[in-house]
Structures are given as structure tokens and as C-alpha cells.
Image (tube, rainbow, N blue to C red):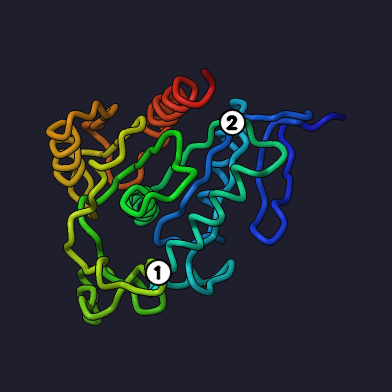
Amino acid sequence: MKLAIVRRLIPDWGTTYGPAGDGPFPAVMLLHGSEGGYSGWSHRNAVMLAAHGFLAFPFPYSNGGNAWNAGSITNVPLERTMEAFRALRAFAFSDAKVGLFGVSRGAEHALLVTSLMVRDGESGLPDAVAALAPPDVICGAFDARRFRDSGDPGFQEWDPAERAWTWKGASDCLLPTTPIAIEDYDGPFFLAHGKKDKVWSSHMTERLTARLRSAGRAPEVHLYEDQGHVPDSAGENVFNADLIGFFERTLCQ
């Protein structure tokens, strides 16, 4: 039996999922949300992309964590993500174009890495960026061990004194509530959000869209009427078709 999807290791960085064969294949780095890199969500999404001809790299960026603990998003060095993205671009099975896709905190992560690379004139920008349920501003640190639902007596808002991200050893430019300057990126952009999202309002995506269009950009935007922060089964089928279509148009031509 021949496998249709195979795993390939990027040394020192992590595993990829992609079609069998010699390649090269259009590639996508995936950035998980607060569920962490070991929950399986980003790996499942990677397999979906691999089934449609992409080399997909789910990058586990959160601090600590394992199969039972999501770890934390605290002082995560964004330049390490840039280096991992460059490793994917240089990987022998990657084609010339490489995209970036994030969900929730991973969407924030994708927007930040891209905007900071643009700001600092870094080479190897993503050839396309996709974000599901993104915020339009930087959010605070997250530690899964302290997380509580809003109805829990132990619930606390994020501490604004704690930083989720660093860039080249500093976090002064990454303070919570700071708008993410994604309008400086002039590549293809995909934004998607469920209008019934009770975690991060879809108004965040609407504000991102308005800023991008004011800057002369033309993002592809999908607002799903009956979906929340995480799409249900039927909604995910619609989203996956939209996402794969976007990457086919931007990375495969």
C-alpha cells in the first residue's frame, strides 16, 4: 500500500505533512491557537492541506506544553517563528511559494510576524497570509494552567503587565491593545471569522478589513453568519474550501 500523505521532518524544527512523491510542493506554515501545539488541531488542519497538494508545517510555538497541557503564550520570541518559516522555505520539498496560516492566537501571531518582517525589511516574507478569527490588536499573555471560563469564580482578565510576544529580545513595541500594522504588507490576504464568535468579536476582522482597504489592499474576506470562534462540521467544510481555494490561487500559480 502506498500512502497518499506522508510526514517529513524539517531537522531541528518539526514535522510536515504532504503528498507522497518527490515534490516540490507549495508550502504552508500553520500557527495554532491557545490550545497549544500538541492538541492535534493544527496537525489535523495540516493533513487537510496535505490532502489537497500542499506541504503543511504545523509549528508548535507555545512555551512548554505536552499532550495534556497547552503550555503558555508568554514572551514567545517571534523571530524564532520567522526562522522556522525560513527553514520551511529552504526545505527540499517546498516549492518557490510559501504561505502562512494562523487560527485565533495563531492568527494574531501570523499577523504580527508578517507586519514585523515588513517593518524591519526582513527577507523571505510570506507569499500569502491567511487568518481565521484574528484580533486586530495585540493581546495579553496566556497561560493554560491559569485559564478559567468567564463564569468560573477564579476567572481573571489577562494581566496587561504580562507580554505574549517578544521581537528580537524586546517587547516594547508589542504592548497589549496595540493595533497590528498588517496594512503594511502588500501580499495576498485572507481573513475569515464567524459572526457568532463569543471569544473574539468578528468586528475585529471587520476593522482589519477596513484598515487594509484604506491602505489600498484588497483582502479576501469571509464572514460566516452562523459560526462561532471554531466552525462546526458543516461550517468547517465551507471554510476549508475557501482557504484551500485561496492558497491554490496564490501559491500554485
Q: Nearer the viewer, residue 11 or 64?
A: 11
Displayed quadrant of residue 243: top left
Q: Nearer the viewer, residue 226 or 130?
A: 130
Residue occupying image coordinates x 65% and y 56% = 14
Mark 1 sits on what residue?
73
Residue occupying image coordinates x 35% and y 42% = 131
Q: Is residue 1 left or right of residue 59?
A: right
Q: Where is 224 relative to 101, above or below?
A: above
Three-letter amino acid code of the residue under disc 1: Ile
Between disc 1 and disc 2, the foreground one is 2
Q: Residue 33 at what x, y percent from top left?
A: 41, 56
Q: Which residue is at the far front?
A: 121
**Circle 2: is it few (<14), some (14-19), or many (20+) Cα within 10 Å?**
some
**Circle 1: is it few (<14), some (14-19), or many (20+) Cα within 10 Å?**
many
Instruction: Give the label on residue 246, or none.
Output: none
Residue occupying image coordinates x 65% and y 30% = 25
**C-alpha gap between disc 1 and disc 2:** 31 Å
Mark 2 sits on what residue?
96
Q: Which image quarter is the N terminus in? A: top right
Q: Residue 112 at what x, y percent from top left?
A: 33, 54
Q: Where is 218 relative to 229, above or below?
A: above
Q: Residue 191 at what x, y percent from top left?
A: 30, 36
- Mark nearer the N terminus (1 vs 2): 1
* SS at circle 2: strand
* SS at circle 1: strand
Residue occupying image coordinates x 59% and y 40% = 56
Three-letter amino acid code of the residue under disc 2: Ala
